[in-house]
Image: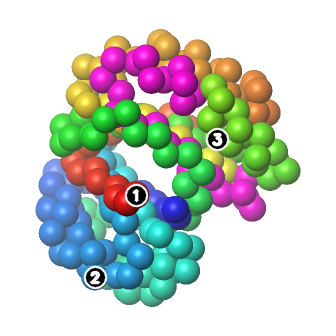
Amino acid sequence: MFVRAVYATGDPALLDTAIRSVNSEGRDLLEERPGYRGAGVFADRELGKLFTVSWWETEEARRNSDAVMRERRRGLLEPFAGTLAVAEYEAAVFHEVRHPRQGGGLRVTRMEFDPRDADLVVDTFRATVVPRSESLPGLAETTLLIDRERGRAMTGSLFLDRASLGASRAAVAGLRHAVSAKAHADVVGLEEFEVVHADVRFD
């Protein structure tokens, strides 16, 4: 599976307009594209951040879809988006414990590493985070997205509700430290979002 992540920031008062546009017209556009396997929409309403992720069956499907989405993306996010960044990843690990739901919480951790250590990052995440995170109350899924060429990774821990997200912070801090040390990776970002929509199809 392959992923395109879009990260936009802007006026919090205009965020709901962008969410409605992404969840209606934006989702319709994605669903028309061959190889589309699902999407997630996440928001920080207080600071004015919108984070969307689309999932693709192959790298080619992701690349072909961007020819259409690139033309429409800015219009879908206006007038909210003051800044807009797009990144592409391989979905190296996707572990679903239970299906996520609207109103839950997402924690995103960004890491950088020597590209030569990409397999080490994946193996460490799979061996350390996946089994230990299953015991976290309210966990829905955990994911590792990786850009092997640039030495960048993004992990996502999705919880059924915001209370579970908050209660997990101490335990996840320990996991974050363990992965960083074992995989020789530097943590360069940590964010939390509200789950507006999350749905990925692997069958």
Q: Which residue is mark 3?
A: 111
Q: Which residue is mark 1?
A: 202
In the rendered structure, which disc, 1 or 3, sits on the residue that comes first in sequence? 3
The answer to whether 131 is drawn above or below residue 87 in the figure is: above
* Magenta highlight range: 129-151
Mark 2 vs 1: CB contact within 8 A: no
The image position of residue 129, as x and y in percent, is 57, 28
Instruction: Residue 82: tell me if it is visible.
Output: no
The answer to whether 146 is drawn above or below residue 66 in the figure is: above
Q: Which residue is mark 2?
A: 32
Mark 1 vs 3: CB contact within 8 A: no
Using residue 42 as the reference point, say whether residue 102 is left or right of it.
left
Q: Categorize mark 3 by other alpha carbons within 10 Å: few (<14), some (14-19), many (20+).
A: many
Q: Amino acid at mark 3?
A: Met
The C terminus sits in image quarter = bottom left
Element at label 3? strand
The image position of residue 72, as x and y in percent, is 32, 82
Residue drawn at x 64%, y 41% as measured from the top left = 111
Element at label 1? loop
Residue drawn at x 19%, y 63% as measured from the top left = 23
The image position of residue 39, as x and y in percent, is 33, 60
Query: Which residue is at the front of the view, 141 or 194?
Result: 141
Mark 2 to mark 3 CA distance (whole Å): 33 Å
The answer to whether 81 is drawn above or below residue 182 in the figure is: below
Using residue 152 as the reference point, say whether residue 3 is left or right of it.
left
Q: Nearer the viewer, mark 2 or mark 1?
A: 1
